[in-house]
Amino acid sequence: MGAILRRPAIALIATSLLAGRAAAEIPAGSGNTNERITISSGRFMVSGGQFWINGANTPWHNWNDLGGNFDPDWWGAHFLLLHSRGINVTRIWISCSVDVGIEIDEEGHISGATPAYWNDLGRLLEIAQRNQVYVLATLMSFDHFNTHHHNFKRWRKWIGTNEGIDSYIKNYLHPLLERYGRAPSLWAIDLMNEPDWVFENAEDGKLPWASLQSYFARAASEIHRDSEVLVTIGMAMPKYNSDAARSAQGDKVGDASLRAVFSDPGARLDFYSTHYYDWCGPIWGNALYLSPKAYGLPADKPSIIGEFPAHGTKGHTVTADYESAFQNGWEGAMGWTSNSVDENGGISELGEATLAFKQRHSELVYPAGGK
């Protein structure tokens, strides 16, 4: 999703951690975020028990919060609200369009992030841990490359060369992992929100998959080498994440595709994250009422539905959507959004569904004993 929605017929819509403090110094909270989420036999696990992603998206409060207008009081209150509704994971865009926070020059070279950015990210992860909510951190979006955003030319140059990508790995991603890669609340990194549009749409660059894959493979390799954080990509649809779905163009983010451009065992995703909106239904069916395999996704990794409308899919309540996703073998579902950033709903609808799921399946939502 984002400031610029990629749905047919939808128009433009638009204090305690010091900078540089290591993740190991983040104070321990209570409940399940003291334990890292892992994968075993195709399922997420915490403390030896199955963990189901009863999730949400809280992509931003203020666009480009980190290093910009970050409001810890708002985030603290909202995380408390998420926890009260049984939400155990939320997805946050830790850079929305990089107008602030991350330093990039006109040639697409990344020199690092600002002290304010690191300080805000540390505070965000501390707030999450204190409230027993894990964070799926989205590093970037198609917005980085979109003509509506200030630095789009720089980001198109950046992804066009391996040297540019390596500067991001060395000067931004590696320091991020050094600082926060051991924070249990940072359970996974989403390398990009909906790269499908970067390939398909001229206003997002119409860039080749080879460039995107070079970034994905190098970044995934770095994350797997330097941390236990899991890796995914928030794909808009099965079209580029499948060899079997209708109109599929091949799994552009599968192991073989990524290692073809960067030969390293760490060049891989740990789980798939597909997004579902009702425009997808006539092509692939309603993902929440199909198994991942029936929806066209590969069966070699766990799959979650990383976005779907918080007010529910067509003809269904959002409460039914969550339960059906679980019954059909998805390892999690994450409504868009908890804070009503657009017309797809918010916590008033979403929270009723996630609380109902927690009440039915508390052992899956908090296997480590959180409440």
Image (cartoon, rainbow, N blue to C red):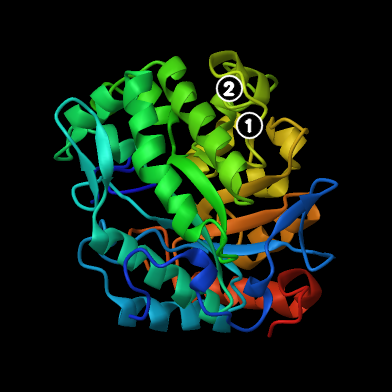
Mark 1–mark 2 Cα distance, whole angstroms, equals: 7 Å
Q: Is residue 332 left or right of residue 61?
A: right
Q: Residue at x 41, y 19 (%)?
A: 211
Residue with the mark numbered 1: 268
Front-most of residues 30 and 199: 30
Label annotation for residue 360: none
Amino acid type at circle 2 is Leu
Res 192 → quadrant: top left
What is the x, y in percent for residue 226? 57, 45
Q: Is residue 123 left or right of residue 253?
A: left
- Quadrant of the drawing holding the C terminus: bottom right
Tag 1, which secondary structure? Answer: loop
Q: Is residue 366 above or below residue 174?
A: below
Tag 2, which secondary structure? Answer: helix
Q: Residue at x 27, y 36 (%)?
A: 110
Q: Earlier in the sequence, mark 1 or mark 2?
A: 2
For the residue carrying disc 2, how many other residues have a C-alpha within 10 Å: few (<14), some (14-19), or many (20+)? many
Front-most of residues 141 and 169: 169
Q: Is residue 74 left or right of residue 126?
A: left
Residue with the mark numbered 2: 258
Q: Is residue 101 above or below residue 104?
A: below
Q: Is residue 203 above or below residue 51?
A: above
What is the x, y in percent for residue 224? 61, 41
What is the x, y in percent for residue 277? 50, 45
Q: Residue at x 33, y 18 (%)?
A: 161
Q: Is residue 185 visible?
A: yes
Q: Are marks 1 and 2 in contact (CB under 8 Å)?
A: yes
